[in-house]
């Protein structure tokens, strides 16, 4: 095999590879000999078919098989001999005519991963905002828990429905006198004032009495999810079957025990820790954003065009989907494409940098961490946990997709340990305001739809 490197720019590499006809012929002979040991044809016993007959019948197919094998081996050897690190699969182009007795010439082109070099993160300075959980936030959370644990009892003596009551009712909805799918229910429980129904629906049931029919007239919002109903007037024929009032529950030891805590103090501590974790997650996201911005500013190495193009296409596909769904995007499409190509290049550059840091510092994702990620995914689908777990267990490729974000977070944590991170105490309001401002500064008009 003869390999000649051709001129190429930047991270691109190009080679002309020639495989002698004799090498292909030897591979064909090897396959014919192998087939002859077990081949069976009419008039011959298994293993006794003449090699010439096999060559005549299968020669062309075996030559194609030999070509494919030789090209794959030649490509792999060229990459290995030169210590190349391909960014993507090489592109192969066959030159000239292919046939028996002819040398095979093809060109291989590829892009290699950039050499990032030695990295030093000790000079990176970041600020982490830390919010202390106020007692009032804990009090409010406990009150919400108490409200969620309220009990209901039938109103006694009977009276018309009031705001705050829970009604059990039947209803049938229609538009222009025609019932529509999903507009009918029986024994539906609705809390008046919850805002869970179309605006105006619950208000018209205030004053309703058990057994007395009520026609509730509403208009579906123009942006209603069902386009067949959006903006249309509807009538719901309702019948109230029961009226219940809520019995308030105090936040006390009894409520704590009902929620599997030893006492109110233990529940209060757990609630405070959970709120603190939420604030810490917001803070973590902000300091990660700062870190990635710093890394993008200080590391300007060249990135493979193929990877950037792939990332851009993925982003642009989401932009197109957002436009189809009616989301407003910038009118100047060329300007948008330029902006998103820059975003794509930044993502690829940061991805390569984090991958290099992880590799050089032996950062890996353990099977336990991957299984925990699968469990978290399953818990997102209440009632379908088993199906989700089975899906990931049967689809190793989908399970592997959970590895990348875990690897990224571990690598970011590793860098944060090396960087100079100072903490600043803030109120929760200040933390959330800073997070919103960071989003407004960093995100472009359709970036949410493009985010990976």
Image: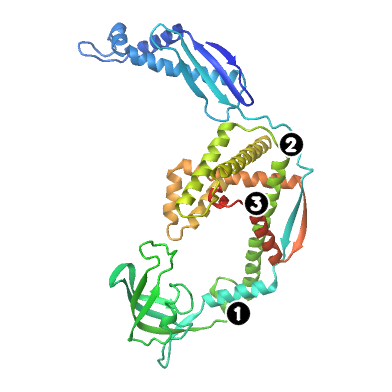
Q: Quadrant of residue 241?
A: bottom left
Q: Residue at x 65, y 30 (%)?
A: 114
Label 2 Cα crowd, 10 Å radius (few <14 / some 14-19 / many 20+): few
Secondary structure beneath dot 3 equals helix
Out of 411 and 33, give the one closest to the viewer: 411
> Which label is found at residue 119?
2
Q: Which residue is mark 1?
A: 252
Q: Is residue 145 above or below residue 318?
A: below
Q: Which residue is mark 3?
A: 442
Q: Residue at x 56, y 13 (%)?
A: 3
Label 3 Cα crowd, 10 Å radius (few <14 / some 14-19 / many 20+): few
Q: Position of residue 370 (x, y in %)?
A: 55, 46
> Which label is found at residue 159?
none
Identify the mark nearer the N-term, 3 or 1.
Answer: 1
- Spatial CA span between label 2 and label 1: 55 Å
Nearest to viewer (mark 2 / mark 1)? 2
Identify the mark nearer the N-term, 2 or 1.
Answer: 2
Q: Is residue 381 above or below residue 408?
A: below
Q: Quadrant of residue 305?
A: top right
Q: Position of residue 239 (x, y in %)?
A: 33, 81
Does 16 sit left or right of 382 as displayed?
Answer: right
Q: Residue at x 44, y 18 (%)?
A: 69
């Amino acid at each position: 095999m003869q390999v000649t490197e051709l001129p190429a720019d930047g991270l691109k590499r190009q080679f002309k590879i020639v495989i002698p006809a004799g090498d292909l012929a030897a591979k064909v002979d090897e396959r014919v000999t192998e087939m002859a040991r077990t081949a069976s044809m009419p008039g011959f016993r298994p293993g006794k078919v003449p090699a010439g007959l096999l060559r005549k019948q299968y020669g062309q197919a075996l030559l194609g098989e030999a070509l494919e094998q030789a090209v794959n081996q030649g490509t792999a050897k060229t990459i290995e001999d030169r210590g190349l690190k391909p960014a993507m699969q090489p592109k192969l182009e066959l030159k000239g005519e292919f046939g028996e007795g002819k040398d095979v010439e093809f060109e291989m082109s590829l892009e290699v991963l950039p050499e990032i070099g030695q990295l030093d993160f000790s000079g990176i300075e970041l600020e982490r905002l830390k919010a202390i959980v106020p007692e009032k936030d804990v009090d409010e959370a406990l009150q919400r828990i108490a409200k969620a644990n309220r009990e209901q009892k039938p109103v006694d003596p009977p009276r018309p429905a009031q705001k705050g009551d829970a009604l059990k009712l039947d209803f049938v909805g229609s538009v222009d006198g025609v019932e529509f799918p999903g507009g009918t229910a029986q024994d539906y429980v609705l809390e008046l004032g919850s805002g869970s129904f179309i605006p105006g629906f619950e208000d018209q049931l205030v004053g309703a009495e058990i057994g007395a029919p009520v026609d509730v007239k509403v208009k579906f919002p123009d942006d209603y999810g069902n386009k067949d109903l959006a903006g249309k007037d509807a009538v719901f024929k309702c019948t109230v079957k029961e009226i219940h009032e809520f019995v308030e529950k105090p936040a006390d030891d009894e409520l704590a025990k009902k929620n599997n805590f030893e006492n109110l103090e233990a529940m209060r501590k757990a609630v405070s820790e959970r709120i603190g974790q939420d604030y810490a997650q917001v803070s973590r996201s902000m300091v990660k954003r700062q870190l990635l911005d710093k890394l993008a500013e200080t590391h300007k190495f060249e990135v493979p065009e193929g990877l950037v193009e792939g990332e851009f296409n993925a982003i642009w596909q989401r932009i197109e989907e957002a436009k189809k769904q009616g989301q407003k995007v910038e009118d100047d499409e060329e300007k948008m494409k330029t902006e998103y190509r820059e975003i794509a290049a930044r993502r690829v550059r940061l991805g390569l940098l984090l991958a290099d840091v992880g590799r050089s510092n032996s950062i890996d994702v353990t099977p336990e961490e991957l299984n925990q990620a699968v469990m978290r995914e399953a818990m997102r689908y209440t009632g379908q946990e088993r199906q989700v777990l089975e899906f990931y267990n049967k689809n190793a490729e989908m399970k592997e997709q959970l590895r990348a974000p875990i690897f990224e977070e571990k690598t970011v944590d590793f860098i944060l340990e090396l960087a100079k991170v100072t903490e600043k105490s803030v109120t929760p309001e200040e933390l959330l305001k800073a997070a919103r401002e960071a989003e407004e500064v960093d995100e472009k008009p359709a970036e949410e739809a493009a985010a990976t």
